[in-house]
Amino acid sequence: MISQEQISVVLKDLPSQFSIDELVDKLIFIEKIEDAIRQGERGETYSTEEARELLRQWSK
Protein backbone atom coordinates (compact mmCIF):
# COMPACT_ATOMS: atom_id res chain seq x y z
CA MET A 1 0.00 0.00 0.00
CA ILE A 2 1.04 3.55 -0.59
CA SER A 3 0.89 6.05 2.23
CA GLN A 4 -0.53 9.55 2.02
CA GLU A 5 2.98 10.84 2.70
CA GLN A 6 4.33 9.03 -0.35
CA ILE A 7 1.53 10.47 -2.49
CA SER A 8 2.33 13.96 -1.17
CA VAL A 9 5.98 13.54 -2.17
CA VAL A 10 4.99 12.38 -5.65
CA LEU A 11 2.61 15.31 -6.07
CA LYS A 12 5.26 17.81 -4.95
CA ASP A 13 7.73 16.39 -7.51
CA LEU A 14 5.31 16.69 -10.43
CA PRO A 15 5.11 19.86 -12.52
CA SER A 16 2.19 22.23 -11.93
CA GLN A 17 0.30 20.55 -14.78
CA PHE A 18 0.46 16.80 -15.39
CA SER A 19 -1.63 14.02 -16.80
CA ILE A 20 -3.40 11.42 -14.73
CA ASP A 21 -1.33 8.82 -16.60
CA GLU A 22 1.89 10.39 -15.28
CA LEU A 23 0.57 10.31 -11.73
CA VAL A 24 -0.63 6.72 -12.03
CA ASP A 25 2.70 5.63 -13.54
CA LYS A 26 4.61 7.13 -10.62
CA LEU A 27 2.27 5.59 -8.04
CA ILE A 28 2.52 2.16 -9.66
CA PHE A 29 6.31 2.49 -9.68
CA ILE A 30 6.36 3.29 -5.95
CA GLU A 31 4.01 0.39 -5.21
CA LYS A 32 6.24 -2.04 -7.11
CA ILE A 33 9.29 -0.86 -5.19
CA GLU A 34 7.43 -1.29 -1.89
CA ASP A 35 6.37 -4.80 -2.95
CA ALA A 36 9.97 -5.70 -3.82
CA ILE A 37 11.20 -4.44 -0.44
CA ARG A 38 8.59 -6.55 1.37
CA GLN A 39 9.54 -9.61 -0.70
CA GLY A 40 13.16 -9.09 0.25
CA GLU A 41 12.26 -8.80 3.92
CA ARG A 42 10.35 -12.10 3.68
CA GLY A 43 13.29 -13.78 1.96
CA GLU A 44 11.43 -14.19 -1.32
CA THR A 45 14.49 -13.49 -3.44
CA TYR A 46 16.82 -15.36 -5.78
CA SER A 47 20.55 -15.71 -5.40
CA THR A 48 22.69 -14.46 -8.26
CA GLU A 49 23.27 -18.01 -9.44
CA GLU A 50 19.55 -18.83 -9.29
CA ALA A 51 18.77 -15.71 -11.31
CA ARG A 52 21.41 -16.61 -13.91
CA GLU A 53 19.95 -20.11 -14.24
CA LEU A 54 16.46 -18.69 -14.71
CA LEU A 55 17.75 -16.34 -17.40
CA ARG A 56 19.47 -19.24 -19.16
CA GLN A 57 16.21 -21.20 -19.14
CA TRP A 58 14.15 -18.26 -20.39
CA SER A 59 16.53 -17.42 -23.23
CA LYS A 60 16.29 -20.89 -24.83
Image (cartoon, rainbow, N blue to C red):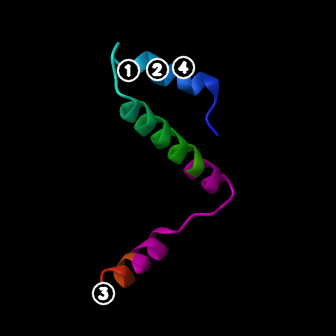
Task: Say if mark 2 contacts mark 3, CB within 8 Å.
Answer: no
Residue type, label 1: Leu
User: Quick check: is 2 in the magenta stretch?
Assistant: no
Q: Secondary structure at mark 3?
A: loop
Residue 8 in which image quadrant? top right
Report which residue position mark 1 lands on: 14
**In front of the other: label 2 or label 3?**
2
User: Quick check: is 41 in the magenta stretch?
Assistant: yes
**In front of the other: label 1 or label 3?**
1
Q: What is the magenta segment's predominant secondary structure?
A: helix
Q: Along the polypeptide, which appears first: circle 1 or circle 3?
A: 1
Report which residue position mark 3 lands on: 60
Residue 45 in which image quadrant? bottom right
Quick one: label 1, few (<14), some, or many (20+) residues within 10 Å?
few
Quick one: label 2, few (<14), some, or many (20+) residues within 10 Å?
some
Front residue of 42/2: it is 2
Task: Say if mark 2 contacts mark 4, CB within 8 Å.
Answer: yes
- Whether residue 10 is situated above or below residue 54 in the rendered picture: above
Report which residue position mark 4 lands on: 8
